[in-house]
Image (cartoon, helix red, strand yellow):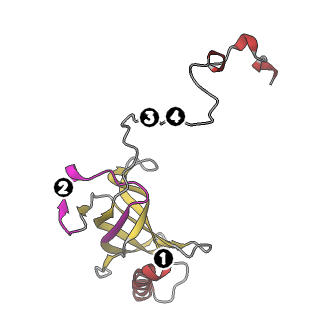
């Protein structure tokens, strides 16, 4: 059995976070708390090295090992996938624990750190090193749509107003018959 290897990331940018509630969209029976964490190659380097060393220690020189990271060849940015079926513990920038009831809605673009253990696995002939999420430190929170009902300011040079009766709705009798399309 592989030894337990803890990890802690540098500050990264959350992409597709499901940290407030688990994501069940693709697997209703096995929902997961998860996020992708984007960072520069330099920031990602220590964790990539740790994962590669764990793979070498556990799988020797086997090929086709799956890792929970990918690199965007255009930007050089690295994306780590961290996940857990259990709700992680949350911390603020001062290291204070955040009670789940006080957790803000964490949306994409939020800055955070992730910590947990490496998940070294060998299943059905597939070997890999994943990242099991245990803790999240919120550094800068971007809150998602709040649904507060706030509207918009007027726009100059616009040509549509609900007051213009000619522009409201579609009068089928005055328009081309849609069955002709």
Residue at x-position 76% and y-position 20%: 178
State left or right for residue 97 relative to residue 132.
Answer: left
Which range of residues does the magenta coloring cover?
Answer: 94-115
Q: Which residue is mark 2?
A: 99
Marker disc for residue 154: 4
> Which type of secondary structure does the marked residue at label 3 adopt?
loop
Coordinates of residue 93 in the picture (x, y in percent):
25, 67
Mark in front: 1 vs 4: 4
Tag of residue 151: 3
Q: Earlier in the sequence, mark 1 or mark 2?
A: 1
Callout 4 environment at 10 Å: few (<14), some (14 to 19), or many (20+)?
few
Q: CA distance from mark 1 to mark 4?
A: 40 Å
Mark 3: few/some/many CA within 10 Å (<14, 14-19, 20+): few
How much space separates mark 1 and mark 3, taking CA atoms?
37 Å
Q: Nearer the viewer, residue 58 or 131?
A: 131
- Label 3, label 2: how far apart the Cα atoms are: 32 Å
Q: Residue at x 41, y 72 (%)?
A: 130
Closer to viewer: mark 1 or mark 2:
1
Measure how far apart labels 4 and 2 are at the Cα level: 41 Å
Query: Which x, y percent locates residue 147?
Result: 38, 38
Relative side of 25 to 180, left or right: left
Query: In the rendered image of this protein, does residue 169 appear above or below residue 71?
Result: above
């Amino acid at each position: 059995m592989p030894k337990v290897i803890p990890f802690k990331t540098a500050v990264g940018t959350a992409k597709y976070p499901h940290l407030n509630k688990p994501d069940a969209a693709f697997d209703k029976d096995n929902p997961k708390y998860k996020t992708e964490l984007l960072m520069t190659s330099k920031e990602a380097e220590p964790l990539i090295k740790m994962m590669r060393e764990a793979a070498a220690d556990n799988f020797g020189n086997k090929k086709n090992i799956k890792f929970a990271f990918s690199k965007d060849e255009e930007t050089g940015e690295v994306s780590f996938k961290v996940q857990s079926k259990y709700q992680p513990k949350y911390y603020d920038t001062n290291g204070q624990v955040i009670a789940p009831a006080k957790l803000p809605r964490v949306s994409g673009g939020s800055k955070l750190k992730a910590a947990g253990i490496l998940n070294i696995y060998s299943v059905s002939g597939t070997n890999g090193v994943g990242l099991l999420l245990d803790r999240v430190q919120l550094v800068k929170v971007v809150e998602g749509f709040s649904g507060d009902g706030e509207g918009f300011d007027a726009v100059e040079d616009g040509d549509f107003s609900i007051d213009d009766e000619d522009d409201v709705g579609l009068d089928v009798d005055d328009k081309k018959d849609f069955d002709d399309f």
